[in-house]
Amino acid sequence: MNELVASTVSRAEVEDLFYQEADLLDSWRLDDWLELLTDDAAYYVPPNDKPDADARYALFTIADDIVRLRERVIRLKDPNCHAEYPLSRTRRMIGNVRITGVDGDMISAAANFIIHRYRHNDLDRVFVGQYRYKLKRHGGRLKIAERRAILDAQQLGLLGSVSFIL
């Protein structure tokens, strides 16, 4: 680990960021969630058989840059967004948080997740997987530069639509 950055970030600080993010997403405070991201952030949901794939060369479930993320948030907040109106209720459990590396000013971190999703007139769904993050310090606080949600499911079709932010 880069000793300068390693000495300025702790697992507890990373955990606090992840817990705050989970709370914002579960509360559908999507504009506040966007504030946790860098101005060049990316959000990926890669194919479950190629979690380390490059979005330029593989078909991802989601491969959004910050512009597309902002547009996604606008759509999800719109009552005409039929995929999420009324809004799903979600509850995230985050665990096994760890700092996995430091490269210059970029901090790599990972965590396991379980998301319970409840939707009117639909089966309850459970999404299980691992988050992989790239974090940067900006203005004294950690921000998310990249977020990769890797689903453990073998068959994504059984999970229904992924119209919310994983």
Image: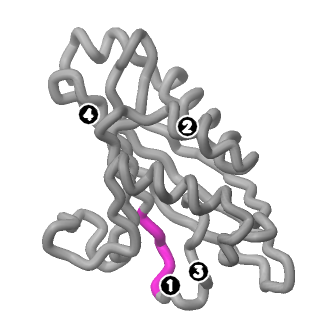
- The answer for how far apart the CA atoms under marks 4 and 1 are is 30 Å
Q: Which residue is located at x 54 percent, y 30 percent?
A: 17
Q: Amino acid at mark 3?
A: Ser
Label 4: which secondary element: strand
Q: Amino acid at mark 2?
A: Phe
Label 2: which secondary element: helix
Q: What residue is shown with label 1?
A: 156
The answer to which of marks 2 and 3 sits earlier in the sequence is 2
- The answer for how far apart the CA atoms under marks 2 and 3 are is 24 Å
Q: What residue is shown with label 3?
A: 161
Label 3: which secondary element: loop
Number of other residues with Cα within 10 Å of mark 4, as a class: few under 14, some 14 to 19, many 20 or more = some
Report x, y in % for residue 48: 37, 76
The label on residue 18 is 2
Question: Could you say which quadrant of the image residue 9 lies in?
Answer: top left
Which one is in front, 68 or 91?
A: 68
Q: Main secondary structure of the magenta part?
A: loop
Which one is in front, 2 or 72?
A: 72
Q: Quadrant of the N terminus?
A: top left
Q: Amino acid at mark 4?
A: Gly
Q: What residue is shown with label 4?
A: 101
The answer to which of marks 4 and 2 sits earlier in the sequence is 2
- The answer for how far apart the CA atoms under marks 1 and 2 are is 24 Å
The answer to which of marks 1 and 2 sits earlier in the sequence is 2
Question: Could you say which quadrant of the image residue 82 lies in?
Answer: bottom right
For the image, the number of numbered tags is 4
Number of other residues with Cα within 10 Å of mark 1, as a class: few under 14, some 14 to 19, many 20 or more = some
Number of other residues with Cα within 10 Å of mark 3, as a class: few under 14, some 14 to 19, many 20 or more = few
- The answer for how far apart the CA atoms under marks 4 and 3 are is 33 Å
Q: Is residue 41 left or right of residue 154?
A: left
